[in-house]
Amino acid sequence: MAVVQPTNRSVESYKGLHLYHGDISNCSMRVRMTLIEKGLDWTSHHLDLRKKENISENYFGINPNGLVPTLVHDGVVHIESNDIIDYLDRTFPDPPLRAPGNEGEVLEWLRLAGSVHVPAIKPYVYATMIQKKVKKTAEEQRKYDSLQKNVELKDFHSKHAGSAAFEEKDLVRSKEILADCFGKLDAALDGEDWIMGDRFTLADISWIPVFFVLTGCGYPFEGYRNIIRWAKSFNDRKSYREGILQWCPDFSKV
Ligand SMILES: N[C@@H](CCC(=O)N[C@@H](CS)C(=O)NCC(=O)O)C(=O)O
């Protein structure tokens, strides 16, 4: 569980569930979906990533990586979206979003989504769509460099700073990792409604936002017939409509 001690202590007095999140952020989408699946009340603290609202001393004092989402629950700060949805399901178990007897496999899907975020999902999204929209001015870059202590994230952001652009090898690597993930996902969905069979779980919630965002970036899903069928079945789900579409109707237009 990723609990952090905030240096911005103002959040310690928060009561209930407070979510710092971004409309276009796939990691925020999975937390919004989980809150909606559970029918929980939550207070929204929206940060516009296009306006770099996450790059502030105040926010780095809450989330030391300056990333969204951050959940504050009764003053305790939780980061890492896949840990947050697991925490929410354990803390508010009704309705359950795990698979009885197969919890390990659900958590493995969450771990996979988390582990490919920086090497695969982020480079694909930035290189194909986002990098132009979130380009930092020299001043913003200086501020980011002074606030960001995480070396992996500093390195990632330096790849599209100033006139820099992602190298072809970053994108090739990202496509290899994604092809491997979607091969696994398509196989898991073969003959099944959901990733874990007939039960909608955190595994679906972890991967639906990835599918949504990459579709907006033009990722070629045509060959994955089980993924395409799965996407049709979550299309009418309340948590998908209110947790994703209501905030970001079409990722290709962000
Ligand atoms: N591992 C983190 C990743 C969070 C993350 O990268 N969030 C993105 C949006 S999906 C973000 O805040 N981007 C802004 C930035 O990189 O400055 C999680 O799962 O919560």
Image: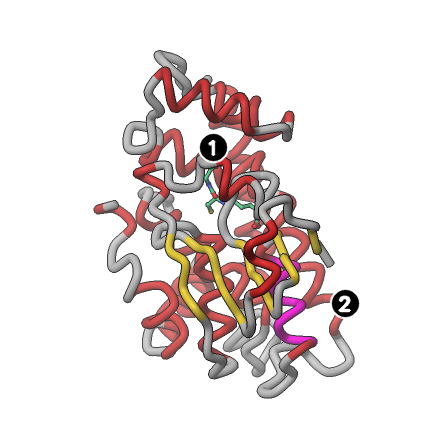
Q: Magenta stretch: residue 199 in it?
A: no
Whether residue 166 is visible here, answered yes or no, is no
Q: Residue 221, image x and y in percent?
A: 39, 51
Q: Position of residue 150 (x, y in %)?
A: 64, 30
Q: Quadrant of the C terminus?
A: top left
Q: Residue at x 57, y 69 (%)?
A: 195
Q: Which residue is mark 2?
A: 104
Q: Amino acid at mark 2?
A: Gly
Mark 2 vs ligand 1: CB below 8 Å: no
Q: Which mark is residue 123?
A: 1
Q: Is 168 displayed left or right of 111 in the figure?
A: left
Main SS of the magenta segment? helix
In the displayed structure, would residue 184 be above or below residue 234?
Answer: above
Q: Which residues are magenta?
A: 82-90
Residue in view at x 54 percent, y 40 percent: 60
In whole angstroms, how far apart are the C-alphas of marks 2 and 1?
A: 28 Å
Q: Residue at x 49, y 42 (%)?
A: 58
Element type at mark 2: helix
Rate crowding at label 2 as few (under 14), some (14 to 19) or many (20 or more) other CA atoms within 10 Å. Answer: few
Residue 83 sits inside the magenta stretch: yes
In depth, the one of 164 and 186 nearer the eye is 164
